[in-house]
Image (cartoon, rainbow, N blue to C red):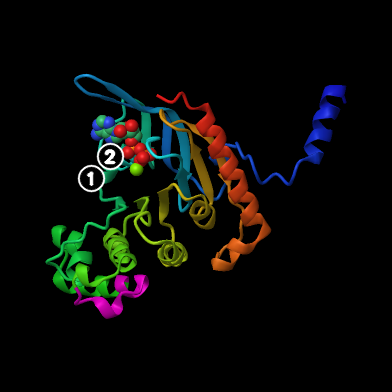
């Protein structure tokens, strides 16, 4: 063994268990075959007088059935990335594939359920009719819609509110309805853009564990979750992709090796605190790296 190697081994032995900086490609992390692949993606918005580089050379994978969070400062291109994955717009450079097909094609096949920060429910429709809306649009038979909506409201805990109108619900309940609606047509992908960002802190914490329960009740669903809450990302995710300030780049991917099912009490564990601290540090480093433009 050369000195250099021995030194390397000695260094490695001093480091904490290999749970922090995982760089290995996803193909080596069976049983999660790649579902969402983002390769060297950039996105530039050009206006009449100005141009903004929202994303620069972004690459990451999300495995089938994985829960992956994207975290980064406001304006770093998280929503842009979600819209690219959802096939709602095209990248300026690079490539995105959804199980080998284009996002646009996957969207046409109704593979994405999307939940935004604001639940965008229709005020003149009951909870039942809001949740069933996509199925109505897809001309699903009425009886089938009825039973599916009942099943979903059970899952998200809104069974007693089928006949209520959105304005009669709390913010957390409205977001549950939006999640149920996104899941109504059984999409393999759930894309969530800061879904709990508008909720008060206590409701937000509760919705996190609720989402984990809902996710467990829809096995195989792949989740791409955008947040700027570090603790939310740790609580929910299999992996967290950390992005730098604009132009958004991936600075690090962190595996969250906390056991599942996770409950509120996991927040009190030392490991949770360690992940929280690590992500906080990475985000601060990412901010320092940014060119401020
Ligand atoms: P985040 O969700 O991380 O806060 P966004 O993806 O919303 O960030 O925005 C990233 C950057 O791209 C911002 O500077 C924003 O102003 C810009 N941007 C986003 N969408 C558009 C658009 N349609 N036209 C022009 N600029 C945009
Ligand atoms: Mg956003």
Relative to 94, say whether 12 is above or below: below
Cβ–Cβ below 8 Å for labels 1 and 2?
Answer: yes
x and y, in percent, of residue 131 in the image: 23, 65
Q: Which mark is residue 108?
A: 1
Quadrant location of the N terminus in the rendered image: top right
Front label number (1 vs 2): 2
- In primary-sequence order, the first of circles 1 and 2 is 2
Q: Main secondary structure of the magenta part?
A: helix
Q: Which residue is mark 2?
A: 87
Write down the region rendered in magenta. Answer: 152-164
x and y, in percent, of residue 217 in the image: 42, 67
Measure how far apart labels 1 and 2 are at the Cα level: 9 Å
x 83%, y 23%: residue: 4
Left or right: 39 in relation to 84: right
x and y, in percent, of residue 20 in the image: 65, 43
Q: Secondary structure at mark 1?
A: helix
Left or right: 65 in relation to 42: right
x 42%, y 62%: residue: 204
Relative to the observer, which residue lies in front, 232 or 15?
232
x 14%, y 67%: residue: 125
Residue 69 visible within the image: yes
Q: Secondary structure at mark 2?
A: loop
Determine whether the beta carbon of the residue marked 2 sits less than 8 angstroms from the nearest atom of ligand 1. no
Q: Residues within 10 Å of mark 2 (few under 14, many from 20)?
A: many
Relative to 190, say whether 95 is above or below: above
């Amino acid at each position: 063994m050369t000195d250099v190697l021995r030194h390397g081994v000695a260094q490695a032995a001093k480091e904490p268990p290999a749970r922090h900086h995982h760089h290995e490609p996803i193909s080596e992390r069976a049983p999660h075959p790649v579902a969402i692949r983002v390769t060297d993606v950039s996105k530039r918005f050009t206006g009449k007088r100005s141009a903004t580089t929202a994303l620069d050379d972004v690459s990451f994978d999300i495995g089938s059935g994985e829960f992956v969070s994207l975290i980064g400062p406001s304006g770093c291109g998280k929503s842009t990335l979600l819209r690219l994955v959802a096939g709602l717009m095209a990248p300026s450079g690079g490539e995105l594939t959804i199980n080998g097909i284009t996002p646009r094609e996957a969207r046409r096949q109704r593979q994405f359920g999307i939940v935004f920060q604001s639940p965008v429910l229709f005020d003149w429709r009951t909870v039942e009719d809001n949740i069933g809306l996509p199925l109505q649009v897809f001309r699903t038979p009425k009886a089938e819609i009825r039973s599916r909506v009942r099943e979903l409201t059970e899952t998200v805990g809104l069974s007693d509110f089928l006949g209520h109108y959105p304005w009669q619900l709390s913010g957390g309940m409205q977001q549950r309805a939006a999640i149920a609606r996104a899941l109504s047509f059984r999409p393999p992908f759930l894309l969530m853009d800061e879904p709990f960002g508008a909720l008060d802190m206590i409701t937000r914490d509760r919705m996190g564990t609720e989402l984990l329960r809902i996710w467990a009740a829809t096995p195989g669903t792949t989740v791409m979750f955008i947040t700027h809450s570090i603790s939310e990302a740790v609580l929910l995710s299999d992996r967290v992709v950390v992005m730098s300030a604009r132009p958004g780049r991936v600075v690090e991917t962190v595996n969250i090796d906390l056991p599942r099912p996770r409950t509120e009490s996991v927040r009190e564990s030392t490991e949770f605190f360690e992940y929280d601290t690590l992500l906080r540090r990475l985000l601060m480093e990412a901010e320092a790296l940014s060119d401020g433009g």
